[in-house]
Image (cartoon, rainbow, N blue to C red):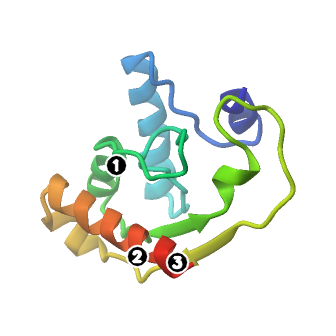
Amino acid sequence: MYGKLIEKWGNIPIERKSVQKSITSMNKAKLKLQNDNSILVFPEGGRTRNGQLLRFKKLPFQLAKDAGVAIIPVGMSGVYSLNKKGSVLMRPGRVKIKFASPIPAEKVIALPHDELMKETRAQIESLIEYI
């Protein structure tokens, strides 16, 4: 359901069941970045069942490295309670969002994937705790 809405709104959904479609989506995202557009990526690649962060996927970090762009870690709190996985109902409530300082493009390019993922995750976790 969300994939169709995301696409209708002009966003780029990732089709996890098809490697070729995932690659096509990532190439579209890379093109947007190379044309000075910003994109929002959820590095978990899915929705949590318990409100906790999931394991991060490598592909978003490869995208940032390939496009040579900075990463701005974003912490969000309250989303899980508004719409739990498996439910189509949206509940009223508040979502709090906090932004960290950007990880510069030079650092994104230089760091190995695992270190970049760890640093980004640590910043997001600290933002969520702060919220």
Amino acid type at mark 3: Phe
Seen at 28% across and 44% down, the residue is: 58
Task: Estimate how packed mark 1 is, as few (under 14), some (14 to 19) or many (20 or more) residues with alpha carbons within 10 Å.
Answer: some
Q: Which secondary structure lies at badge 1?
A: helix
Seen at 32% across and 75% down, the residue is: 103
Of pointers 2 and 1, the one earlier in the residue sequence: 1
Of pointers 1 and 3, the one earlier in the residue sequence: 1
From the top left corner, tell me how far across and down residue 2 is, in percent.
70, 32
Q: Which secondary structure lies at badge 3?
A: strand
Q: In this image, 52 relative to 6: left or right?
A: left
Task: Examine the rendered structure and indicate whether residue 37 appears above or below residue 8.
Answer: below
From the top left corner, tell me how far across and down residue 94 is, in percent.
77, 67
Tell me the quadrant of the picture where the N terminus can be found. top right
The residue singled out by tag 2 in the image is: 126
Taking the view exactly as shown, the residue that stands out farthest to the right is 92
The residue singled out by tag 3 in the image is: 99
Residue 48 or residue 124, whichever sits in front? 48
Residue 63: image tag: 1
